[in-house]
Amino acid sequence: MINVSLSETAIKLVTIHFRSEEDIKKRSLYLQEIISMSRKERLWLRALSAYFGSPMELPSLRALCKN
C-alpha cells in the first residue's frame, strides 16, 4: 500500500476544481434547457442570440444538410 499525504493547498485546489466542474455541468444543463425552449418560443431564440452576440439567422428551408 502506498501512503499518500496531500498538502492542505493541494486539497483546496482539488475541491475548487470539483466545485467548478459541477458548476459547469449545471450551467450546460440550463443552457440545454433554454435551447430546447427556443425551439418552441421565438423569445428564447432572441435571448440566446443576444446572449451570444451573434446575429439572428433562421435556417433556410432549402438549405442542404452540412453533415
Image (cartoon, helix red, strand yellow):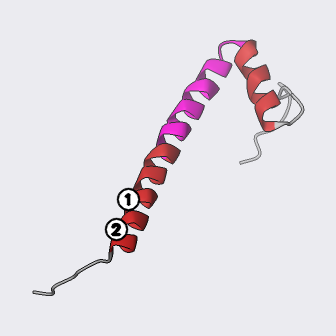
Q: Quadrant of residue 10?
A: bottom left
- Compute the Cα span from label 2 to label 1: 6 Å
Q: Is residue 57 left or right of residue 44?
A: right
Q: Quadrant of residue 28?
A: top right
Q: Which residues are magenta?
A: 25-41
Q: Is residue 4 left or right of residue 42?
A: left
The overriding secondary structure of the stretch rendered in magenta is: helix
Picture residue at 80% right of the left edge, 30% below the top: 49
Label 2 neighbour load within 10 Å: few <14, some 14-19, many 20+: few
**Residue farthest to the bottom?**
2
Picture coordinates of residue 56 (x, y %)? Answer: 87, 28
Q: Secondary structure at mark 2?
A: helix
Q: Is residue 1 left or right of residue 5?
A: left
Picture coordinates of residue 7 (x, y %)? Answer: 32, 77
Q: Amino acid at mark 2?
A: Ile
Q: Quadrant of the N terminus?
A: bottom left
Q: Is residue 52 left or right of residue 24?
A: right
Residue 15 numbered tag? 1
Residue located beneath label 2 in the image: 11
Position above or below: 50 against 66: above
Picture coordinates of residue 23 (x, y %)? Answer: 49, 44
Q: Secondary structure at mark 1?
A: helix
